[in-house]
Amino acid sequence: MNKELSGVDLFKVIAAGGVVAIHCGVPFLEQLGRLGVPFFVIISSYFGSLSNPVDNE
C-alpha cells in the first residue's frame, strides 16, 4: 500500500512548523503548533495500524 495522501503530508509539514514555533516562542504559530503533537500521534497510530494488522485469532 503506497498511496500518496498529499493533504495529510501538507498538514504534517504545517504541524511540524508549528511544533518548532512552540520551541522558538512565536506567538501566533505557537497555538497552531499545539495541534501538531496530537495530530502526529493520531496519524502515526492510524498508519501504523494499517501496516501492522493485529490478528485476533
Image (cartoon, rainbow, N blue to C red):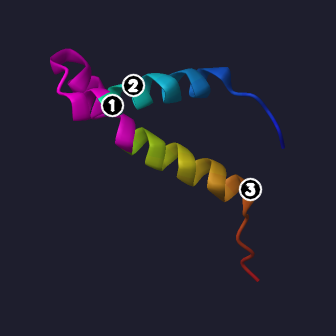
Query: Residue 52, image x and y in percent?
Result: 72, 63
For the residues marked 2 and 3, what is the alpha-carbon distance in whole angstroms?
27 Å
Residue 33 x, y percent position in the rendering: 30, 30
CA gap, disc 2 to disc 1? 5 Å
Q: Which residues are magenta?
A: 21-37
Q: Quadrant of the N terminus?
A: top right
Q: Are marks 2 and 3 in contact (CB under 8 Å)?
A: no
SS at circle 2: helix
Residue labelled with disc 2: 17
Whole-angstrom CA distance, mark 3 to mark 1, is 28 Å
Question: Residue 20 got which mark?
Answer: 1
The residue that appears at 75% across and 75% down in the rendered structure is: 55
Residue most extreme to the right: 1
Q: Amino acid at mark 3?
A: Ser
Q: Is residue 17 magenta?
A: no
Kindly indicate whether the residue at mark 1 contacts the one at mark 2 (C-beta within 8 angstroms). yes
The one nearer the camera, 26 or 1, is: 26
- 53 shown above or below 48: below
Per the rendering, the mark at residue 51 is: 3
Task: Work out whether residue 33 or residue 24 is closer to the camera in this orientation and state it.
Answer: 24
Select label 2 or label 3 by which is in front.
2
